[in-house]
Amino acid sequence: DWMYIYNNTFVSFDHKFGSGGNCMRTGVNTGNNLFIKNNVFVQLSDHSYRACIYIYNDNWAGVLDNNVYFKKHHLNRTIATKAAGYTLAEWQNAHVHDQNSFFADPIFVNFPSSGMTSGEGNYRLTSLSLEALENGATLSGFLDDYDRVTRPQGLAWDIGAFEYVLEGDPEPP
C-alpha cells in the first residue's frame, strides 16, 4: 500500500511528567511507498535523543522532501535513524532525501509558550514564515488546507497544514 503524509504541522513539546517524543517516527517495514512532503516539524524537547523525524530503518527508500524542520536543542539530531543523528545539512549530503527542505523557525501566528498546551497555539503561517511560504511541492489528491483555503494562494504551495492568507484577504471558511 502507498502512504502519503502531506502538508501537516507536527510539534513535539517537553511534557511536565516526562520527555517529549519525536515529531514523527517511521516503522521498521514502511518500505518505499511512504511519501512525506510539505510538512513542518518542530521539536522543542531539550533531550538529546529526540528528533524532528526518526527513521527506524536505515535503508529506508521512501521520499522526504519540501519539509521545514526546526529544533532548538541538539541540532545533530534534527533527523535520526537507528544508526545516527544528523543536522539537516548532513542528512542532505548523506542521502537523496530533503534536497528541497529547510531548517528554519516556521514563525507561527501564536506559538504556545511554556506551560501552555499545544492546543492553545495558532500554527498558521505568517508573512515571516519565509522558508515555508511558496516552497512546497505541488501535490495531487487535494486542493485545500486544514481551514479549507484553496492551495496555492500565491505562486506555489506553502509548507505545513495552513496556506498563508495575505492580510486583508477574506477569512478562511
Image (cartoon, rainbow, N blue to C red):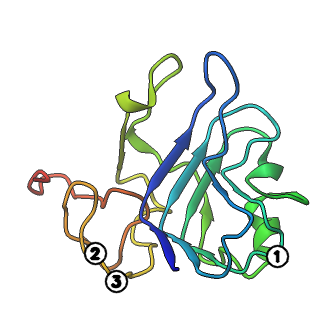
Where is residue 35 drawn, in percent x and y? 55, 75
Q: Are marks 1 and 2 in contact (CB under 8 Å)?
A: no
Q: CA distance from mark 3 to mark 2?
A: 6 Å
Say what amino acid the circle numbered 3 marks: Ser
Residue at image x 82%, y 66%?
A: 90
Q: Residue 155, located in which quarter of the rendered image?
A: bottom left
Give the alpha-carbon distance from disc 1 to disc 2, as whole Å. Answer: 30 Å
Which amino acid type corresponds to the residue marked 2 in the rendered image? Phe
Mark 1 residue type: Asn
Q: Do residues under tags 3 and 2 come within 8 Å of each other at their CB atoms?
A: yes
Circle 1 or circle 2, nearest the eye: 1
Residue under the point 72% across and 80% down: 61
- Label 2 residue SS: loop
> Seen in the image, is 168 located left or right of residue 142?
left
Q: Earlier in the sequence, mark 3 or mark 1?
A: 1
Q: Are marks 3 and 1 in contact (CB under 8 Å)?
A: no
In the image, is residue 71 above or below residue 45?
Answer: below
The x and y percentages for residue 114 are 53, 20
Q: Residues within 10 Å of mark 2 (few under 14, many from 20)?
A: few
Position of 88 relative to 65 (above/below): above
Query: Vertically, is 63 above or below 107?
Result: below
Residue at (69, 61) in percent of width and height = 27
The residue sitting at 19% across, 62% down in the picture is: 149
Where is mark 1, residue-wise?
59
Residue 142: numbered disc: 2
Front disc: 3 or 1: 1
Closer to us: 3 or 41: 3
Which residue has dot 3 on it? 140
Q: Secondary structure at mark 3?
A: loop
Q: CA distance from mark 3 to mark 1?
A: 27 Å
